[in-house]
Image: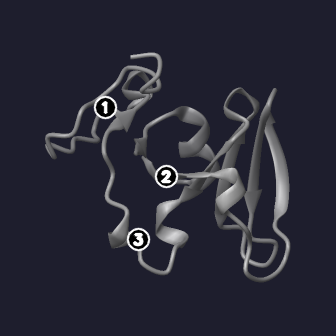
Amino acid sequence: MVCHCQSCRRLCGAPVLAWVTFAKSQFSYVKGEPAQLQSSPGVLRTFCAACGTQLTYHNDKYRDEIDVTTCTLDDPAAFPPTHHSWMSHNVAWVRFGDGLPAHAKSRADG
């Protein structure tokens, strides 16, 4: 998904951030240990300790899932987005026109 929320925007310094969701049990780091930040209650984000790139997002509400920043993967083209979330936080000059479903909040919230 492509996230437009204020938290993602501020933490990555960009108008949107693309994420892909994996089962937490199917995800691991290949090398090194990331730095961590609790960005809000129940939300843990990880970052590359060397360069600061945001790597993951984990929300306690979805204990079995982890979101990974799509463009940190070796083949981001293998994981195209399926929707836009948090359009209620969208920066006014960001317009996609890609035809994907767009949700005011998260996909689960509608």
Question: In the image, 70: left or right of 91?
Answer: right
Q: Residue at x 29, y 41 (%)?
A: 94
Going from N to C along the chain, the mark reached first, 1 or 2, is: 2
Q: Which residue is drawn at 52% across and 73% down?
A: 73
In the rendered image, the vertical position of residue 78 relative to residue 6, given as above or below: below
Q: Residue 39 carries which label?
A: none
Question: In the image, 105: left or right of 83?
Answer: right
Q: Name the residue under label 2.
A: 19
Q: Name the residue under label 1.
A: 92
Say which of marks 1 and 2 sits in front. Answer: 2
Q: Which residue is drawn at 57% across and 43% down?
A: 8
Query: Which residue type carries mark 2?
Result: Trp
Question: What is the CA distance from the residue labelled 1 to the residue labelled 2?
Answer: 21 Å
Question: What is the CA distance from the residue labelled 2 to the residue labelled 3?
Answer: 10 Å
Say which of marks 3 and 1 sits in front. Answer: 3
Query: Which residue type carries mark 1?
Result: Ala
